[in-house]
Image: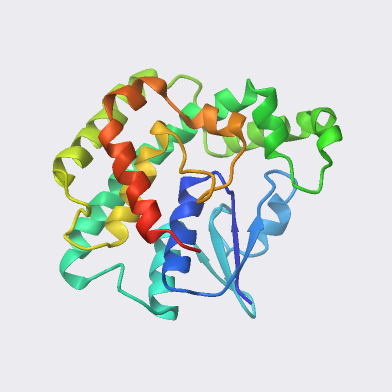
């Protein structure tokens, strides 16, 4: 069976999972452990390609790297309505580009906050670590987080980036929707990738994306929650109607 390697709390991973689930492509999910599994991950990417997740491994060993490429691979493999209708490809590309910029800022915002949160560090540990020992193993999670920050060159200051990048992106999303349920008139990958920008207003509800409360807190920017409640409602409705695994 195909394997999707990713991080549960990552917007990039969620884009890939949503596309695979939408097209009912069978796969097993492998929750990547940063630093510890880096050498293993490198074995599954082509030479010269940066080892990062999400990564879709097709038997007998071919791989597709990155959420956008995985979503297009799901379109080839699966069934159901198209997420990439030809007449909307240009718009989808524009929303994907904007989403990538916002997710970069989201990672910049969340990672230092995770380093400062003992609860988020405990929640980031693999599930096989017993609850009673999670506090003891929290330094392992901190090492993994610092590794991710170095790998992606994450700075420690984000408020200026939020005002210059995230706020205009969310305002653009609000204007493009204009109260409508979909960006392009019907559900497409544009909606999936745009929905990831709303992570600053809090991750999706637990029934869609299980996540500990401390991890949810580090991704949430309360100032943006107050400014864009309509986008939060839009994202939640989109999940309720289209995010079924």
- Of residues 16 and 119, which is closer to you in this image? 119
Relative to residue 77, is residue 117 drawn left or right? right
| Residue drawn at point x = 55 percent, y = 61 percent | 55
Q: Picture coordinates of residue 96 (x, y %)? A: 31, 52
Q: Picture coordinates of residue 197 (x, y %)? A: 35, 41
- Of residues 88 and 175, which is closer to you in this image? 175
- Of residues 234 and 85, which is closer to you in this image? 234
Q: Tell me how the rendering is colored.
A: rainbow
| Residue drawn at point x = 23 percent, y = 71 percent | 85
Above or below for 158 versus 7: above
Relative to residue 95, is residue 124 drawn left or right? right
| Residue drawn at point x = 36 percent, y = 39 percent | 198
Above or below for 216 versus 157: below
Q: Quadrant of the N terminus?
A: bottom right
Relative to residue 38, is residue 140 drawn left or right? right
| Residue drawn at point x = 20 percent, y = 53 percent | 183
- Indicate the quadrant where residue 157 lies: top left
- Indicate the quadrant where residue 88 lies: bottom left
Q: Picture coordinates of residue 243 (x, y %)? A: 42, 58
Total numbered labels: 0
Q: Picture coordinates of residue 148 (x, y %)? A: 60, 38
């Amino acid at each position: 069976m195909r394997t999707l390697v990713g991080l549960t709390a990552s917007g990039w991973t969620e884009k890939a999972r949503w596309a695979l689930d939408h097209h009912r492509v069978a796969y097993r999910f492998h929750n990547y452990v940063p630093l510890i599994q880096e050498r293993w991950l490198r074995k599954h990417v082509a030479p010269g390609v940066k080892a990062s997740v999400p990564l879709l491994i097709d038997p007998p060993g071919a791989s597709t790297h990155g959420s956008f490429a995985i979503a297009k691979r799901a379109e080839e493999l699966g069934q159901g309505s198209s997420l990439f209708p030809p007449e909307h490809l240009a718009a989808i590309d524009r929303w994907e580009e904007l989403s990538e910029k916002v997710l970069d800022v989201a990672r910049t915002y969340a990672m230092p906050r995770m380093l400062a949160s003992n609860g988020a560090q405990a929640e980031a540990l693999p599930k096989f670590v017993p609850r009673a020992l999670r506090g003891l193993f929290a330094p392992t999670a901190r090492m993994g987080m610092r590794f991710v920050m170095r790998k992606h060159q994450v700075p420690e200051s984000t408020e200026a980036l939020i005002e210059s990048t995230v706020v205009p992106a969310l305002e653009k999303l609000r204007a493009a929707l204009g109260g409508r349920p979909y960006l392009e008139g019907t559900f497409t990958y544009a909606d999936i990738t745009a929905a990831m920008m709303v992570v600053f207003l809090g991750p999706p509800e637990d029934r869609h994306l299980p996540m500990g409360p401390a991890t949810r807190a580090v991704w949430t920017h309360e100032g943006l929650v107050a400014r864009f409640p309509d986008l939060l409602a839009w994202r939640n409705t989109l999940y309720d109607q289209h995010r079924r695994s």
